[in-house]
């Protein structure tokens, strides 16, 4: 029920019980509605189609264009709107399904990771536990194989380095021996003193590297006997 405020007072909007009064009101309001439709079409250049059926079944219509064309235009517009809504609904359903699949995959991966560290095993049966055990054993085997491969490669590199250092030490020892012979022959210690000192320092560094490599598990040996080192120390002093 509605109440309209008119110039002469308030009018309650409800069904008119008296048939005569209802018919008179219908005629007046119908003509006013048709007039308003005409004014709207002229003032705003709107395409309007107005159809009114009376209680007796009589039809009254107004259109500033062909009324059938306007109705067809209305059908087309509503169909396009319906199709657009349908497409949006289908897209929404698709993304919802994809989101659900991704959540399930994430949950499965999280459960699998927990199983690998020994957590959440109560939900697994004997067959699943056996499969998990085999999977872990294969993984551990691959890890050990890779570890051994890296250890062998590192050991090989250290051995090559040791050989190079030993060759350098042998060359330096020969240079030292040659320098000592020259000093003894010429009785001129200053002539080769600087070169002799540099060679001794380089040899000491190489010996330090060899000792460090021995501490890492690579075999090596001292190229000079202890008494020879004592002799060199006395000579340097």
Image (tube, rainbow, N blue to C red):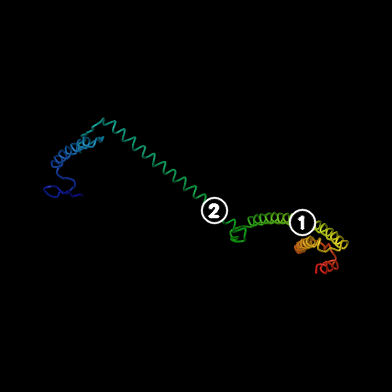
The kind of secondary structure element at disc 1 is helix
The CA span between labels 1 and 2 is: 49 Å
Quadrant assignment, res 58: top left
Of 189 and 196, nearer the camera is 189
Camera sees residue 217: no
Is the residue under label 2 in contact with that under label 1 (CB below 8 Å)?
no
Q: Say whether disc 1 or disc 2 marks the residue closer to the N-terminus.
A: 2
Across and down, in percent, residue 218 comes to 78, 60
Label for residue 106? 2
Image spot of residue 107 (x, y percent): 54, 54
Residue 172 at least partly seen: yes
Q: In this view, does 50 lie to the left or right of 201?
A: left
Depicted 169 relative to depicted 1: above or below: below
For the image, the number of numbered tags is: 2
Does residue 63 lie above or below 85 as drawn?
Answer: above
Badge 1: how crowded within 10 Å, few (<14), some, or many (20+)?
some
Residue 97 falls left or right of residue 212: left
Residues 136 and 124: in front is 136
Residue under pointer 1: 161
User: Where residue 56 sits in the image (x, y, percent)?
Assistant: 19, 36
Q: Quadrant of residue 48?
A: top left
> Which residue ends up furthest to the right in the rendered image?
185
Q: 34 or 235: nearer the eye? A: 235
Q: Position of residue 170 (x, y in %)?
A: 83, 58
Number of other residues with Cα within 10 Å of mark 2, as a class: few under 14, some 14 to 19, many 20 or more: few
Q: What element carries label 2?
A: helix
Q: Residue 124 bears which disc, if any?
A: none
Give the vertical position of 152 relative to 70 (above or below): below
Q: Please, is residue 14 above or below residue 229 in the view? A: above
Closer to us: 215 or 211 = 211
């Amino acid at each position: 029920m509605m109440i309209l405020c008119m110039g002469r007072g308030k009018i309650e909007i409800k069904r008119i019980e008296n048939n005569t009064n209802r018919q008179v009101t219908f005629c007046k309001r119908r003509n006013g509605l048709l007039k308003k439709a005409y004014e709207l079409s002229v003032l705003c250049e709107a395409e309007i189609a107005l159809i009114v059926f009376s209680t007796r079944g009589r039809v009254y219509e107004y259109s500033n264009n062909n009324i059938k064309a306007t109705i067809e235009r209305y059908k087309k517009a509503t169909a396009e709107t319906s199709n657009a809504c349908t497409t949006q609904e289908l897209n929404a359903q698709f993304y919802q399904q994809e989101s659900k699949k991704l959540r399930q995959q994430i949950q499965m991966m999280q459960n699998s990771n927990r199983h690998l560290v020994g957590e959440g095993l109560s939900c697994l049966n004997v067959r699943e536990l056996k499969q998990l055990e085999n999977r872990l054993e294969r993984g551990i085997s691959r890890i050990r194989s890779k570890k051994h491969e890296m250890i062998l490669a590192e050991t090989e590199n250290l051995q090559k380095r040791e050989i190079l250092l030993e060759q350098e030490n042998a060359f330096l020892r020969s240079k030292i021996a040659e320098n000592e012979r020259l000093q003894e022959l010429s009785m001129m210690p200053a002539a080769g003193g600087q070169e002799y000192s540099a060679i001794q320092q380089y040899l000491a560094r190489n010996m330090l590297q060899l000792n460090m490599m021995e501490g890492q598990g690579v075999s090596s040996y001292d190229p000079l006997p202890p008494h020879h080192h004592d002799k060199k120390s006395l000579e340097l002093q």
